Image (cartoon, rainbow, N blue to C red):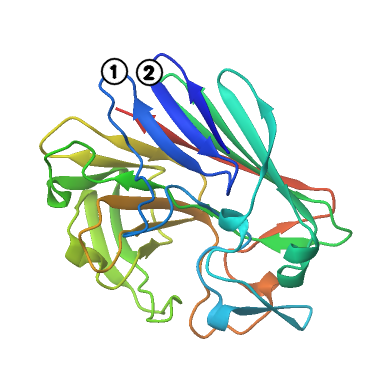
């Protein structure tokens, strides 16, 4: 089921399936900022990544010596949430652990996803609660697909990313199996990164050293832009399909990342993993800013 929120500037559409944001439309001229999930390219618009980000080695991981399996990015993006609360400018969805999730992820949790409209800003709020009787370990991340180009009659190569801090950053390459390697490739030098499809032939660009907490998708031919603001996220991914030609770019702030290719330890020992004590709640947020 779909739900809409609207103010004087924007109209957004959200879905109970995956608690996914499907559309951000500017009312003044009808410009759409999110990819429409056309499965020819990718069957999502803005999925939530939980309880893992990326891939664990062979889709397997350990908790207290027992092996479990999870698909890439976990199960939240393919799960049905339910509506918890809605007002004229906000909406909240929830999903809880159940018999099916406990087979693959041995923790009892409650996940709430909220959206708030504030002028030209869409605030995206996550709450993860540990409702188990033991410590809980998890990762969580965003994967929004921004139309690129945003304006019609432009090309992907007309676009660039703008960082709000000068960067001298190297990406961590992914292996053919989707794990992180131990290499580093210099990628960003300054406050801008020109976009080309060739940049993504080796899959996503993964960073753990960005100083910026805002990344904007911009055009050299128009003034259309969308900014992702995400403070205190230690990892970022940037992605478009490796084959080239897709009309979007994903800007992904993460708490956590894929396994390194040689990792074989317990989930609790994985780099970037979050820990929640019993009855503790983790909350974080990011924003989509238009213009």
| Residue sitting farthest toward the right | 133
In depth, the one of 120 and 248 nearer the eye is 248
Residue 231 appearing in the image:
no
Which residue has dot 1 on it? 28
Whichever of callouts 1 and 2 sits on the residue coming sooner in the sequence is: 2
Is 89 on the left or on the right of 269, as rendered? left
When the figure is inspected, residue 2 is found, relative to residue 157, above or below; the finding is above
Q: Residue at x 79, y 78 (%)?
A: 64
Q: Residues within 10 Å of mark 1 (few under 14, many from 20)?
A: few
Locate residue 144, reporting x and y percent: 42, 48
Whole-Å distance between the Cαs marked 1 and 2? 7 Å
Q: Are marks 1 and 2 in contact (CB under 8 Å)?
A: yes
Q: Residue at x 65, y 82 (%)?
A: 265
Which residue has dot 2 on it? 9
Locate residue 67, reporting x and y percent: 72, 82
Is 141 on the left or on the right of 97, as rendered? left
Is 164 on the left or on the right of 208, as rendered? left
Q: Secondary structure at mark 2?
A: loop
Locate residue 179, reporting x and y percent: 46, 77
Q: Residues within 10 Å of mark 2 (few under 14, many from 20)?
A: some
Q: Residue at x 22, y 39 (%)?
A: 218
Q: Secondary structure at mark 1?
A: loop
Which quadrant: the C terminus? top left
| Residue sitting farthest toward the top | 8
Which label was assigned to residue 80? Answer: none
The answer to which image quadrant residue 225 occupies is: top left
Locate residue 256, reporting x and y percent: 55, 61
Is 161 on the left or on the right of 269, as rendered? left
Residue 30 appearing in the image:
yes
When the figure is inspected, residue 243 is found, relative to residue 176, above or below; the finding is above
When the figure is inspected, residue 80 is found, relative to residue 39, above or below; the finding is above
């Amino acid at each position: 089921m779909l739900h809409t929120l609207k103010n004087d500037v924007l109209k957004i559409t959200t879905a109970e399936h995956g608690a996914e944001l499907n559309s951000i439309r500017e009312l003044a001229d009808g410009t759409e900022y999110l990819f429409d999930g056309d499965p020819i390219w990718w069957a999502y618009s803005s999925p939530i990544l939980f309880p893992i980000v990326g891939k664990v080695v062979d889709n397997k991981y350990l908790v207290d010596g027992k092996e479990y399996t999870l698909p890439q990015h976990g199960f939240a993006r393919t799960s049905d949430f339910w509506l918890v609360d809605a007002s004229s400018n906000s909406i909240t969805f929830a999903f809880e652990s159940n018999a099916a999730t406990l087979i693959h992820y041995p923790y009892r949790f409650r996940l709430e996803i909220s959206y708030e409209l504030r002028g030209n800003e869409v605030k995206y709020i996550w709450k993860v609660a540990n409702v188990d009787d033991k410590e809980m370990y998890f990762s969580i991340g965003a994967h929004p697909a921004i139309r690129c180009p945003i304006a019609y009659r432009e090309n992907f190569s007309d676009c660039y990313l703008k960082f709000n801090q000068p960067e001298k950053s190297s990406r961590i390459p992914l292996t053919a199996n989707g794990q992180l390697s131990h290499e580093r490739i210099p990628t960003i030098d300054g406050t801008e990164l020109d976009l080309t499809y060739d940049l993504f032939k080796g899959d996503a660009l993964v960073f753990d050293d960005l100083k910026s907490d805002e990344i904007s998708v911009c055009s050299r031919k128009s003034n259309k832009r969308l900014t992702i603001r995400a403070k205190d996220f230690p990892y970022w991914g940037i992605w478009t399909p490796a084959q080239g030609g897709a009309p979007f770019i994903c800007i992904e702030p993460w708490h956590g990342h894929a396994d390194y290719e040689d990792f074989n330890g317990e989930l609790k020992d994985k780099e970037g993993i979050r820990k929640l004590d019993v009855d503790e709640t983790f909350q974080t947020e990011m924003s989509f800013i238009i213009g």
